[in-house]
């Protein structure tokens, strides 16, 4: 089943992330697919759902610029520099901490970080309690989705979602779509819309 969440369900959407699920939501540019950054299982599921090469890193989205310092080796001067551009549509590539999980920096020692402009999205990430990894909502190589309708269309018949236990995409805080779209037993999709 596909589940559509509204803004009033932001806690449910963040709980889904904390439990290793996937949530589709609007970023400052396109729709993204978010997962908890510290879950290798969620990372592997997201790679499969997107049909994306496992050696292509995901952007790490934080709820504020200060949080970036908790996961990276940037100086106070560099952090102040980032505050000129973030929050915003910029992804900054910065040096990751030495003990950073390999699935996030893929062994490069660097990570792309971003802070959303939208206050509701910032609060959503803050409710998750940890940064989230967020690639665009699409299949690898395809154009990114720009609305919840596109996300639903692309992922509604996804064979991986129906084949792998505990693999779901929840589409959250949709202001336009408010219905459940049936899927195969054991799979769900949820999309977020209306934050732009």
Image (tube, rainbow, N blue to C red):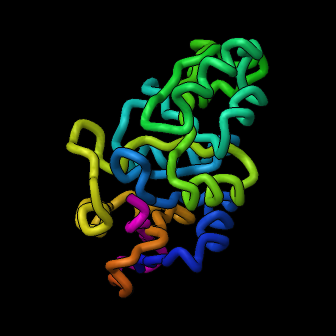
Q: Quadrant of residue 121?
A: bottom right
| Residue 120 x/y as whole percent | 56, 61
Say whether residue 44 is visible.
Answer: no
Question: What residue is at 67 percent from the left and 14 percent from the top?
Answer: 78
Q: Position of residue 117 (x, y in %)?
A: 51, 46
Q: Is residue 129 magenta?
A: no
Magenta span: chief secondary structure:
loop
Q: Give left or right: position of 85 versus 155.
A: right
- In the image, the segment drawn in magenta is 183-196
Residue in the picture at 72% in, 46% down: 130
Look at the picture and state if 61 lies above or below 103: below
User: On the rendered image, what quadrant is the C terminus found in?
Assistant: bottom left
Can the viewer see residue 153?
yes
Q: Quadrant of residue 182?
A: bottom left
Q: Toward the viewer: 146 or 97?
A: 146
Residue at 54% x, 65% y is 165
Q: Residue at x 41, y 74 (%)?
A: 174
Q: Report x, y in % for residue 180.
A: 38, 85
């Amino acid at each position: 089943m596909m589940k559509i969440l509204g803004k009033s369900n932001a806690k449910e959407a963040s709980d889904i992330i904390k439990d290793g699920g996937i949530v589709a939501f609007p970023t400052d540019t396109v729709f993204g697919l978010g997962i908890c950054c510290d879950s290798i299982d969620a990372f592997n599921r997201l790679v499969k759902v997107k049909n994306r090469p496992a050696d292509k890193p995901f952007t790490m989205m934080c709820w504020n610029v200060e949080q970036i310092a908790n996961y990276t080796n940037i100086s106070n001067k560099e952090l102040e520099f980032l505050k000129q551009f973030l929050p915003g549509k910029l992804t900054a590539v910065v040096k990751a901490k030495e003990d950073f999980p390999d699935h996030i920096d893929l062994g490069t020692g660097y990570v792309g970080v971003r802070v959303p402009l939208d206050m509701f999205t910032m609060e959503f990430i803050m409710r998750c309690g940890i940064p989230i990894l967020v690639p665009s909502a699409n299949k690898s190589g395809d154009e990114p989705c720009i609305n919840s309708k596109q996300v639903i269309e692309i992922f509604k018949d996804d064979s991986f979602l129906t084949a792998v236990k505990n693999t779901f995409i929840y589409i959250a805080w949709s202001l336009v779509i408010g219905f459940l779209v049936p899927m195969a037993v054991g799979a769900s999709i949820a999309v977020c819309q209306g934050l732009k």
